[in-house]
Amino acid sequence: KHGGLVLTAHMGNWEYMAAYTSSKWVPLAIVYRYFRQRWAEVLWQKVRRQHAVDMIPESQSAFQIIRRLNQKYAIGIMCDQHVGVPEGVVIPFFGHDVGAMPALAVLQIRTHQYVFPVFCYREWKTGKFVVGVDGKINPEQRRLEEYQLQIHEYVARYQAYIEKWIKQYPDQWLWVHR
């Protein structure tokens, strides 16, 4: 068991996926945004902690992510979040340019960690959730001058995984923001 970075999306039951990953494979810490409703924040913190899922608030993420990686945790990041320009990376997604989150790419480049694309879907015949690891993305050593290009390439690769999963299981992707 060792750490790494986990690429994921709002597919299937992502809370189950986090609990399963943490209990069966490797300790998992997820980067998350606080809920606006205090009662929801308290509830989800309790549920996640009951299933050994560590949580890193987005506002405290840099130091905490490095600390957890050194403790051999996997770090889970939902990469189907819209991020506007200039922070976001403009990437084609289902034929439309979208502002995609560069955080996972920056982490992979700076920490030289593998990225494991992990997704969850419900098998309708059995009613069970399936958690799958869709390969791994190796870190690449590049010259510093290629940093922005490398971020763009990684983000495009991550979005291609998410698009593939959505095409396979379109009824199981939840996206309500844009």
Image (cartoon, helix red, strand yellow):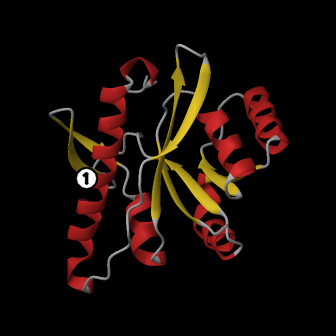
Instruction: Identify which residue, 119 or 152, lies in the foreground.
Output: 119
Q: Position of residue 126 (x, y in %)?
A: 59, 16
Q: Is 163 situated above or below 78?
A: above
Relative to 12, residue 119 above or below: below
Q: Quadrant of residue 162?
A: top left
Q: The residue tagged with tag 1: helix, strand or loop?
A: helix
Q: Label 1 belongs to which residue?
A: 156
Q: Which residue is at 42% across, 27% downward?
A: 177
Q: Please state, as top left, top right, bottom left or bottom right, where the C terminus lies in the image.
A: top left
Question: Which of 70/57 is in front?
Answer: 70
Relative to residue 95, is residue 16 drawn left or right?
right
Seen from the viewer's position, the closer of residues 43 and 49 is: 49
Tell me what residue is drawn at x 63 percent, y 51 percent: 30
Task: Write down the quadrant of residue 150 in the picture.
Answer: bottom left
- Crowd class of label 1 (few under 14; some 14 to 19; many from 20; radius 10 Å): many
Q: Position of residue 155 (x, y in %)?
A: 30, 55
Q: Residue at x 24, y 86 (%)?
A: 143
Q: Is residue 112 left or right of residue 149?
A: right
The extreme front residue here reads 125
Judge whether residue 54 can be spotted in this image. Answer: no
Locate residue 125, reporting x and y percent.
53, 13
